[in-house]
Structure formats: structure tokens, C-alpha cells
Image: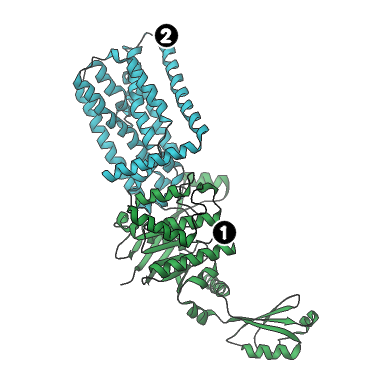
Amino acid sequence: MKRVFRLEKIFIAQYLKQTMEYKADFFVGVFGVLLNQGLNLVFLKIIFSQIPKLDGWSLQQIIFIYGFALIPKGLDHLFFDNLWAVGQRLVRKGEFDKYLTRPVNPLFHVLVETFQVDAFGELLVGVILLVMTTGTVHWTWVKLLLFILSIPFVTSIYTSLKIGTSAMAFWMKKSGAISYLFYMFNDFARYPVSIFNNVVRWIISFIIPFAFTAFYPASYFLTDKNIVFNLGGLVVISIVLLFISISIWNKGISAYESAGS
Amino acid sequence: MAMIEVSHLQKNFKKTTKAPGLIGAFQSLIHPQYQTFEAVKDLSFEVPQGEILGFIGANGAGKSTTIKMLTGILAPTSGFCRINGKIPQEDRKNYVKDIGVVFGQRTQLWWDLPLQETYSVLKEIYDVPEKEFHKRMDFLNEILDLNEFITSPVRTLSLGQRMRADIAASLLHNPKVLFLDEPTIGLDVSVKDNIRKAIAQINHEEKTTIVLTTHDLDDIELLCNRIFMIDRGSEVFDGTIKELKGQFGRIREVEFELVDSNDGAKLDYSTLPVPVEIRQTGNTVVAKFDDSLVSVPNILKLTLAQVEVKDISVKDADIEEIVRQIFRKEAQEHEQLS
């Protein structure tokens, strides 16, 4: 475990040095993320200027859900963004070979290799939104603790979906589009699931469980209701999904065919 | 016990067969057709410690696939390989500490950073103790002359520098076996020479077992104690260079420098029972023949009787010619079979 943190630290330092090599790219990246999040908020604002409540949820509450969603999403983006490269490039071009010739778990090696500083944009916006709307929640110490504890589980849902879908590249050579398709479902997650029809609700709750990355846990913090489903469900889904995605990944590695050289 | 032990190693790939063009691509999307392709067929061999094995074959013969199984990147369809007593696919993380791998066409260096950063990260990945690391870097620097570019970003290195840097990266953790997949590809003659010297020195000083694939036959002639040649996934030859030459090396070349270049037309070997191939450029004539059927002295005698010669040199059969010959023979046999 000590070694894991040590390597993580070294890889992050390495990535930061790399980022410094391309300063313009870095600033444009952060700016892009901020712009994207800003526009999303403007969009919410416009919706609520037309309708005061969305299925019983106020703008303040929706913004809290939104802010909560950004924290784990940002963490996943910050630490585990290299998984995209697996589906898009590393497997197809045989660059994955490198990870298999090193005495480190290949999944771990892929994960620690990038440290996507753009993600600070998401994290920053997320924190600001949470601070702005913190009044909508009746905080207790226990709740604060649950809030903090829920973040790694939510992050793990994002990461697991990326691990599972990018591992499909081991059979399909390229799976970036699948990862993207799955990932984009997270747009549904920031709205109350009750506004969607049954099919979408079912999909985002149990198939691609993004509802557990934002709405369900956040709705517990907002309403104090259904802790078993909202937080217990999060923990169960998060663990099951991680388990499934790691088994897909491991199966994928033995199916890896490299590329001619 | 052998350092590398390969037993009935086999690798099949499932290939989709596609009709050409966009229509073919669509057809294959809806109705994919598969074909099993045997990239490596039933290979068995052993490599003792400290040997340099030249692994050769034409493009697509299965060299890289074999190397990738030996290094634990690919899982064999059947059979196994055992290196230093370990089966790569069983205990990969532990196994790779024993080996170093260089793929000439790829790099494992951190592209955007100064070269030395790569070494300091690899030091952590392979858990090399600080003291050992410095000693190792001194040694590698001495052999591969890294210091002149160790502070430059990898993307600015020349191909020759990058290759030296990649070889050093593969040796940092003092591996018992080194796999070099085309380490001299695309390099100029003097750089090739440096790299060969470095490889020979490492083998000599550290008794590192080396498996080397290459298309450059000078690499083989200068470095390898033994050659293992494959074609279409199967073994076609296993032995020393001397044996290879003995078995296949019947083609000899004699080079004559003529006094008068017009004499070239006078040369006539039709009295001999076998064909002799003649090539002339300026004053130089090269006669190529099978020396199991006609001896070198015979050719000399006949030539000197016909023309006036300033200089003669007799060339040993070079491997390139032998390899070409073997492949030609294989191709013919293959055609006859199918």
C-alpha cells in the first residue's frame, strides 16, 4: 500500500512536469472546463426562470445536486482520466504492451499515469455550488461524515464504468465510443429521477447507475429520507460495479492481442 | 537448466476476413467471417544462460508474436515458455523483474520529459535502491554514452539516441534476460555499430541472456552465437552461423577486377556443368555459383584462362544470401503444397 501511494505521488509529479511543458494547453483546458460548467449553470437558471419548481425541487436544491455531482466526477477526471486512452489508442496501437512488461498492476499503472489538472475546474465549480446552497441542507455531524464517505463510492461508480467500457477494447480494439455513450448518461444524473419516464429511470438507477452518483445520495442529504436506498444502494451498486468492471478488465487482458510491429 | 525453455508454443489469432472496399467493410460488419490464423506453430527450443540468440524470419513470420509470448504480453494458445524457472503468464508481475524489453519501433521513455526523468521513474517502478541506481546509471552511461543528452526532452532525441536511451531503460533493473525486437531498425551504420558493441559488452560483462530479432544480418553475424529462424510460424533452422553456412551456404561469389573492362563480354562459363551468374559493373565482374557443384579453383582457372585480371577476391557466403535462399525454398515448397 505504501508503494502504491509512493508511485502515485511520483506519477503525479511526473505528469505535472509534463503539463508544464505545454502551458498554453493547460490553461485552455482549465478554461474550457470552467466555460462548460458555467454554461450548464446558465442553462439551469433559464429553466428555473420559466418554472419555479422541478417536480417539487427548488432551484437551490437542484444546484446542490449539481454541485454534489461535480465533486466525484471531478475526482475521477483528475485521477483516472487515462482510461479513455485505453479505449481510444493504447490497445488498438499495441501501446498497452508497455504496461504488461512492468512489475506493476497494469490497471493501476494506467490509472496513475495521468493527473488531469483540467479537473480542478469541475472541482472548483462543484465546491462553490455546494457552499452557495449549503443552507438547503440540515447538516449534522453524522450527515457531514456520510457526505464525505459517499464521495469515494460515487467516484468509484464513474471509474468502474470507465474501466469496464474501456476494457472492451481488448476484444474490439477500440471502445472509446462505448465509454463516451455510457459516460454521457451522467447528464441525466443531475436532475431528479422522478422527472424521467420509467425506462430512463430504470437504466440510470441500475444499468448505468448514474442516478446513484448524484440524485439519490444528494436527495438523502436534502430530505433526510430513505437512507437505506439512497446511501445503502450507493454502496452496494458501487462495490458490485467495481467488482464487475475489474473482472471484465482482467478477462480483457488475457484476450489482448497487441498489434503488429 | 536452460534460462529460456520453450515447449510446443502455439498462438492462433482469429482474423476477420473482409472483402475489399467500403461494401466489404459493411458486409463484414453485418456478417463477420472468421478465419483462424496460426501465427506461431509448435515452437520448441531452449536458450542457455549467457547466449545471444538471433531470432530471424521475414516480416509476418511470427517473430514478434513469439517475443510477446516470451515477455508475457500475449498468452499462448497452447504450449508454454518458462524463463528463469518462471512462466510469464502465471506470475507476470514477479516475472517481468527478470527481463528487459526493447521494441525498436516503440519507446517506453516519457516522451515530453528530459530523459533522466524516465530513469528516475523506472527506478521507482522496479524498486531499485538508490545506491544501486547510481552505480547502474554510471555503468549504462559508460556503455551507451547517455550523458550527452540525458537532460534533453525525449521528443528532441535522434533515433539513435532514443534507441540507446531505450536500451538503457530496459537494463536499469539488471535483468537476467534481455529481449531486443529490432534494436537497429532505421539507424545509420555507425550508430548500429555502437549499439552492437554495447549489446556485446552487456552480454559479456553481465552474462545477460539476449534474444534478438532483426532484419539486419550484420547484427546476427556480429552478435549471435546461435540463430533460430522461423517462417510462417514454424522453425526452419536452429543452429550456429557456421552450421547455417554449412547447410545452406553453398552460394559463393568471386570478384575479379579486370584490366580491360571490355573483357567482360569474353567471359564464358558455358563449359561448366552448372550455371554461373555473372554481374559486371565497370571493371569489376562478380561470378556467383553453387560451390558444391563447381569449386572455387575451377572458376579461377577458367577465368584466368579467358581474361587478364588485376585483382581477385573470394567472398564467403553471406547470411543474407542464405536467408533469401531458404525463404525462396520455403516459398516454393509452400506453393507446391497448395
For image coordinates 40% across by 47% down, the residue present is: A171
Chain of the residue under label 2 = A
For residue A49, the mark is 2
Tag 2 secondary structure: helix
Image chain in green = B
Q: Residue at x 55, y 55 (%)?
A: B159
Here the colouring is by chain
Q: Which residue is mark 1?
A: B186
Q: Quadrant of the N terminus of chain B?
A: bottom left
Q: Which residue type carries mark 1?
A: Gly
Give the distance between the C-alpha atoms of the residues marked 2 and 1, in whole angstroms.
Answer: 65 Å
**Residue A32: where, in percent of width, then height?**
48, 26
> x, y percentage for residue A177?
45, 37
Identify residue type, mark 2: Ser
- When the figure is inspected, residue A110 is found, relative to residue B163, above or below; the finding is above
**Number of other residues with Cα within 10 Å of mark 1, as a class: few under 14, some 14 to 19, many 20 or more:** few
Q: Secondary structure at mark 1?
A: loop
Q: Nearer the viewer, mark 2 or mark 1?
A: 1
* Residue A197 showing in the rendered view: no
Q: Which tint is chain A?
A: cyan
How many numbered marks appear?
A: 2
Residue B93 visible somewhere in the drawing? yes
Residue at mark 2 shares a chain with residue at mark 1: no
